[in-house]
Image (tube, grey):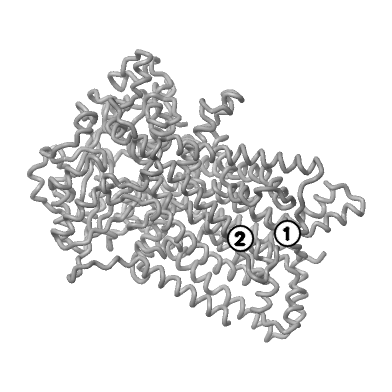
Amino acid sequence: MKRGLGCLFLTILFFVGCRSATATPPVASTEEPRELRVMAYSSFDISEAVIAQFEAEHGALVRFLDAGDTGQMISQAILSRDDPQADVIYGIDNTFLSRALHADILLPYKAKALADIPDAFKLDDQYRVSPTDYGDVCINYDVTHFRERELPLPSSLAALADPLYKGLLVVENPASSSPGLAFLLTTIAEFGEDGYLDFWRALRANDVLVVDSWDTAYYGEFSGAAGSAGTRPMVVSYATSPAAEVYFSEEALGEPPTGSITASGTCFRQLEFVGILRNARNRDLAEAFVEFVLSDTFQSDIPLHMWVFPVREAVALPEVFVAYASVAEEPATLSVGVIEQNRERWVNEWTDAVLR
Amino acid sequence: MRSVTEAEAAGDTVSPSDRSRSRHWATFLLLIAIPTGFLVLFYFYPLGAILRTSVLWQQRPEPLVTLRRLVSPGSLRVMGFTLGQATLSTAITLVTALPGAYVFAHYEFPFKRLAQALTTVPFVLPTVVVATAFGVVLGPESPLVRWLGEGADLRYSLGAILLAHVFYNYTVVLRMVGGFWETLDPQLGEAARTLGASSWRAFWTVTFPLILPVVFAAGLLVFIFCFTSFGVVLILGGPTFATLEVEIYRQTIQFANLPLAAALSLVQITFTLILALVYARLQGRLARPLDFKPRSTVQRRPRKPLDVALVVANLLLMLVLLAYPLVTLVFRSLVSGSHTYALLFENPRQSVFYVAPLAAVWNSVRIALMTMGLALILGLLVSTAVYRRRAGWLVDALFMLPLGTSAVTLGLGYLLAMAQPPFNLRGSVALIVAAHSLVALPFVVRSLLPALKSIRPSLREAAQTLGAAPPAAFREVDLPIVWRALTVGAIFAFTISMGEFGATAMIARADLPTIPVAVYRFLSRPGALNYGQALAMSTILMAVCVVGFVTIEGIRPPGAQDF
């Protein structure tokens, strides 16, 4: 009897201990700052100073929630719609946008700063989301491999089926990876509903390797990434990856070890959005944050932290971006509604054609 | 030899009065109340919430459509593959690790504790990191592949999945079976040999039946782990292979088809339940009361050439299977750059999400220790409540369920149930500790039950006859004997928490980065420095775990001798 009570007491103590451990640290100011909760995917990043500026301007405390990858984040937001975990959601992309809009989890807000942003990025006419950044999913190649063998770069997607490139490409599974899905969408935009599976069958015959995730493809199979044990000189990655290779190297590199192929129709443009969640606790703070995300301060901090381009055109880009990051010439486009409607069918058809 | 049911019957006849019987029931209910409450609150309640939402899902397909897809050739193929690979993986793990368990239980040799700690390291490593190691070990440039030929390149094949499952689960068999075996009286086997049996015959007819319950226990855990395998199958096996767990993730996250995901989840849970029930029933019949001996009387230094050969052969196997991939990782983290480790401590871009290595280590260790504490308390309560009761096996099986439940299903269940009043634990450490403990609990119970069941009831009765109250009898009689099993359970609870990523990835966390989280952050960006730092962080994870294992094994209660 005594022992049972003792254990109960211990358990209660334990939970009390846990709860107090999570309490937010006290802030020096006399006025209690209001809390703004921002839900973002795992690879979201930004400078401390930028967030501190927002906090100082609005007497707020910004708390970030790491919600997993984009798909996991949207699922969580949809399921907790009535009592959301956060006020703001950052990082809905154009492949998931339709699902988020359809589930009606967002509040409309027409930011003033939208005036400085190109219309091409504004995908929702009801302003339930505002564009924040974009990046192109393109094929990256190992510069040394192509140079040493005097191999010409493939000039189009169709060229990838050429025996010249047999066994050289590694791609990600569209069912589990966001660049993988982007690349599948590129092929659908390029060859159409009728032709894309034939192209993939030809790629399969040309010994394409499909792996589960971007990091397995890039660090495990791609030969161009520094430190990788991979053997394939072409991988589906981002047009900014070569710039990151230069930035994240210990010794100064004269030129990137990798390049990206940005020829017309070979890339897919991923757009990312920020939105205010329905039932947000601090709607005015959330609106101020959306405004802030579109401001010069936040936008100019995006490139070196998330390796994508800010949507605000006037923003000065860091040197490494100007020198080594590319933008696709004519990226493939598919409307967000069409993507959401057909995603499951396309992925399943692709799976049957390429993996079975 | 008496079976446990006879022993129970004997125990009951000691105090046949109704009053005593009802007191037994009261003790049982008291002991089981807290763990059951925990299971209901942190498992059945969230599970119920997600299943309910799935059924009422807005964009739901017709129930008939879901049912048809559930029994479609595609789904059945996935179920078949899931079962097949789990069975194969378990069989290979048992065959590979049982000799190792024998060696660790019976021989004393230099660096034994360290070697044992190292075998457990794979268990905590993130799959992406293991994939990197296997890529190096099995890739075209590996010395092993050059020596054995292209056939040894197992990447993206069933072989890679099986190999990785053995790599991960070797330690489960080694620790659970080894920990039990080393307290087994060697005189039992020796007696058989004195009576003229060959050593093989003595093993098969005497020793093997005695260790069978714990072999089953370890095998079941390995099977469920392989059955719900996610990362290993995707990353090492490649996308051609899919398990139920993979399919549940795809349907939930990619296609937002919650009804189908829920149906698949239920299939997985039902299968785990059947397995756990069959196992628990079997276990109850197999366990026998035994006399335990201190480790010192069981273990000896290998002297005869055959003994030495056996020890060396097993250590070599461990070296190639477990140590080689791990050393590869450490080596690559060291050669990846001259300042890789030093740079971990810098935050050049002043990122909000910068993870200081010490903070990550502190978070991981803190959560792991809390998990260990909670899982041990709950595990002890469940085990002591269950092992003397005839219907105990039913309760026992229930506590196995969380292990066989999809992480994505449970994670979303937590979101629905634990982030709203009345139980708003949103973003708190308690939720993560609870999720980890739920998975760790079966390991603690599995380690404890075989040990508790083998204690002769007469020992306890003797203590009580001498005037010890049940709690004192437990402390004086049971605890010293089960201490080894408790240590094994503690190690697994610690390990599961240190390496866990799947379930907590679905619980949105605020500023509580653990070591695996830091590894994934580095790995999500291109560039040599990021890759090097991911490997450096993984090496730190391994080091922290080894220190943890050695420390946990070193703790002994004052009363316990070297059992």
Among the 4 quarters of the image, the one containing residue A104? bottom left
Seen in the picture, residue A165 relative to A338 is either above or below; the reply is above
For label 1, the SS is helix
Task: Provide the chain ID for the residue under circle 1.
Answer: B
Q: Residues within 10 Å of mark 2 (few under 14, many from 20)?
A: few
- Neighbours of disc 1 within 10 Å: few (<14), some (14-19), many (20+): many
What's the residue at 13%, 41% (across, down)? A312
Q: Position of residue B130 (x, y in %)?
A: 50, 41
The reply to whether residue A159 is visible in this rendering is: yes
Badge 2 marks a residue whose secondary structure is helix
Mark 1 to mark 2 CA distance (whole Å): 14 Å
- Where is mark 1, residue-wise? B295
Three-letter code for the amino acid on which mark 2 is drawn: Gly
Instruction: Report x, y in % for residue A111.
Output: 11, 51
Report x, y in % for residue B34. 52, 73
Residue B554, disc: 2
State the residue in front, A336 or B150: B150
Question: Which of marks 2 and 1 precedes in the sequence?
Answer: 1
Q: Nearer the viewer, mark 1 or mark 2?
A: 2
Q: Is residue A10 above or below residue A200?
A: below
Up the image or down, A105 lies above or below B89; here it is below
At a point 77% along the width and 80% down the height, the residue shown is B14
